[in-house]
Image: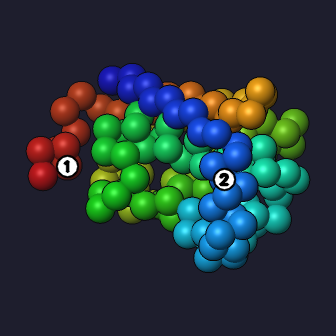
Amino acid sequence: MIHVGTDIVSIERIVRMKRRYGDRFLNRFLYPEEIASAKSDASLAGLWAGKEALSKALGCGIGEQLTFHDMRIVKTPKGAPEAVFSPEAVQRFGIQEHSVSITHDGGFAVAVAVVVRPPRHRKDTQ
């Protein structure tokens, strides 16, 4: 089955959190290589929105079943975002295919994610 998730975040919200909590905030939701690849606050907000959209496509959001560190967003050689899930997340959710798109403009970052999973994956009922 195909599942879609979306998220929008104010770039200013990310700026405030970064100002208030510094590296602790960034390390809470990003891997070091993601932090290094983010060229701006808009990019950081895009990574946040991307991970939130992926979690929504999996039907659980960020929390007990899926953490920010169960997935990374990297760039393809052409600069497009690409999600990489932990092996545990792939198995837990039965992820077969996935895609994420991120954009930012007008003070907001928006992401849309698509995840393909088998119908009624056995872990869904647990």
User: Is 19 rendered above or below residue 116?
Assistant: below
> Seen in the image, is 23 located left or right of residue 79?
left
Q: Residue at x 44, y 25 (%)?
A: 4
Q: Quadrant of residue 92?
A: bottom left
Between discs 1 and 2, the one toward the N terminus:
2
In the rendered image, residue 120, in percent from the top left (x then y), is placed at 19, 33
Mark 1 neighbour density, 10 Å: few (under 14) some (14–19) many (20 or more): few
Where is 51 relative to 17, above or below? above
- Camera-side residue of 18 and 83: 18
Q: Which residue is mark 1?
A: 123
- Dot 2: what SS? helix
Q: Is residue 31 visible?
A: no
User: Which of the numbered marks, if any, corresponds to residue 14?
Assistant: 2
Judged by depth in the image, the label closer to the viewer, 1 or 2, is 2
Color encoding of the figure: rainbow
- Residue shown at 39%/26% (left/top)? 3
| Quadrant of the image occupied by residue 106 | top right
